[in-house]
Image (spheres, rainbow, N blue to C red):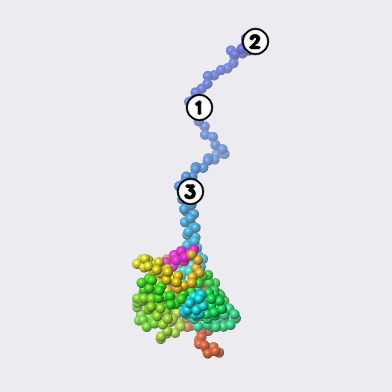
Amino acid sequence: MNKSSDQFAETTPSRAPASLGTFQAVRLSRNGKQLPPKRGWAGGCLSVIGLLLLIAALYLFLPIRSNILVLGVDGGLGRGDLGRTDTIILATISPLKPDVSMLSIPRDLWVPQMDGSENRINTAFFFAEAEEPGSGANVTEQVIYKNFGVPVDYSVVLRMDGVVGIVDALGGIEITLDQPNAGYPAGTHALDGTQALAFARNRSGSDDFFRMTQGQILLRGLLRELLKPASWPRLPSFYLAVREATQIDVPAWQWPRLGLAILRAGPGGIEARAISREMVTPFTTDGGAQVLGPNWEAIDILIEEMFR
């Protein structure tokens, strides 16, 4: 049996196994594609940082306009102390350009109110506060939209006697006058808080149109002082003074966006305009009040230029 099983052994081909060194390596691939290289942690971090920067840029520079109503009020804020708006400024900020503008509105402008009656525009705050303390700003916003077609996003209500503390917290401000105003000659003048309040309230030798510019001049002076590095150590005191004298409904997340736009514009880049004498017609009401009738055709052109 053993002999029979080995009868083909002599004729069976045989080859000694080759060593591995005689083989040639061949690269195998599937459809000609190669696996992508692994991304390291550094590349992932850069992608995240780039995404965050993009989000920050969109947040800071997205061309969404914000309209802010600034009211200077004689009297208390939300405490039942009734006062009328002595200063009415409608500001608008668009961060991309940046576009920062403010429109002063005469307090004696005779306009329709929310209840259908007609009255001075500055009475909207007064009557709303008399009916429901704390509602004056909201009702005034509605009156602004009803008459000017400009939606108000936020409001800042300043108690006028709070100007003293705000200005003094900065160590005073400087104002620049192109022409004599409120007893000051043309030129640059340094004012402390008491002088700034007197300037804002001055009524001698001027009409409502001169008085409107006084509020804008003070705002410019405040902004100019805030932008000085020498004033920055005073910012905590300034913040406390503003908090005490104002009601502000601008949300905290908007402050960096709006603040950067104002900073980029600078005091010289802020456009200040007003409803002028040419846009109104003075008249006396049946009740004997001297008021200003709006020329809506002229006013609408101004609104279109500033807020559209």
User: In x, y percent, where is residue 133?
Assistant: 53, 76
Label 2 neighbour load within 10 Å: few <14, some 14-19, many 20+ = few
In this image, 168 relative to 74: left or right?
Answer: left
Mark 1 / mark 3, whichever is N-terminal: 1
In this image, 293 relative to 182: left or right?
Answer: right
Q: Which residue is mark 2?
A: 1
What range of the chain is rendered magenta?
253-263
Q: Which residue is mark 3?
A: 44
Real-space CA distance between mark 1 and mark 3, rounded to the nearest whole angstrom: 41 Å
Determine the residue positioned at 49% across, 23% down. 19
Determine the residue positioned at 50% across, 80% down. 82
Whether residue 250 is visible here, answered yes or no, is: yes
Determine the residue positioned at 50% across, 73% down. 69
Which three-letter amino acid code belongs to the residue tagged 1? Phe
Foreground residue among 98 and 136:
136
Question: Is 257 one of the magenta-colored residues?
Answer: yes
Real-space CA distance between mark 2 and mark 1, rounded to the nearest whole angstrom: 41 Å
Residue 15 lies in quadrant: top right
Label 1 neighbour load within 10 Å: few <14, some 14-19, many 20+ = few
> Is label 1 or label 3 in front?
3
